Image (cartoon, rainbow, N blue to C red):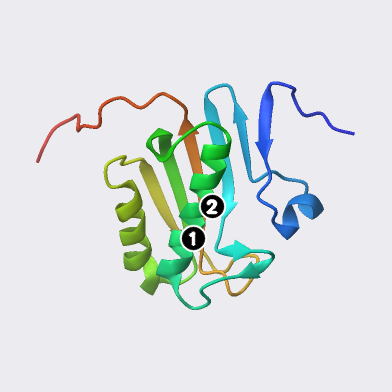
Amino acid sequence: MTNASPLRWRHFGGGRWEDVFGYSRAIRTGDRIIISGCAAVVDGGVRHVGDAGAQMGMALDNVREAITVLGGSFGDVILTRTYVVNRADFDIVGRVHGDRFGDVRPVATMILVAGLLDEQMLVEVEAQARVRSAKAYGRVGRRS
């Protein structure tokens, strides 16, 4: 039985926990796309063990896939939330984020956590996008 609205589209990433825990990788409702935690996991196995930068890149690839399948693009991303297991990895994880989102500049938060679902995961990313909302990139506000 489901109470899912017929006005939303779901994307399943194929993760082993999606069916067991009852969630979707991403959901689009109207012009919003919300992506759940993406990590460097393929076919149930963590990739790039010990390399937070490579895991971040792969997690963002998974975010991009989910957004694209649901009709959006990286340019539509308005928020990212990144969970990092090791404080020492903040710089490399942030730089990978910057490489991917340098022109988009979504609001972003990086959070230090005690651990993730699989102990080999070093990074997990959530994102939100608003499809076709992006205007010309620029800066608004005071400069110091």
Q: Is 97 located above or below residue 114 in the figure? A: above
Residue occupying the far right of the picture: 1
User: Where does label 2 land, which residue?
Assistant: 62
The image position of residue 58, as x and y in percent, is 49, 60
Q: Residue at x 69, y 21 (%)?
A: 7
- How crowded pointer 2 is (Cα within 10 Å; few <14, some 14-19, many 20+) is rated as many
Q: Which residue is drawn at 45% across and 62% down?
A: 56
Q: Is 95 located above or below residue 37 in the figure? A: below
The image position of residue 20, as x and y in percent, is 81, 54
Q: Which residue is drawn at 30% across and 54% down?
A: 99
**Residue sitting nearer the eye, 124 or 96:** 96
Q: Quadrant of the N terminus?
A: top right
Q: Which amino acid does label 2 sit on?
A: Asn
How far apart are the two marked residues, 2 and 1, measured between alpha carbons? 6 Å
The image position of residue 91, as x and y in percent, is 31, 66
Q: Which amino acid does label 1 sit on?
A: Met
Tell me whether circle 2 and circle 1 mark residues in contact (CB < 8 Å).
yes
Label 2's element? helix
> Is 109 situated left or right of 18 in this image?
left
Q: In which quarter of the image is the C terminus?
A: top left
Q: Which residue is drawn at 45% across and 75% down?
A: 51
> Is 63 situated left or right of 43 in this image?
left
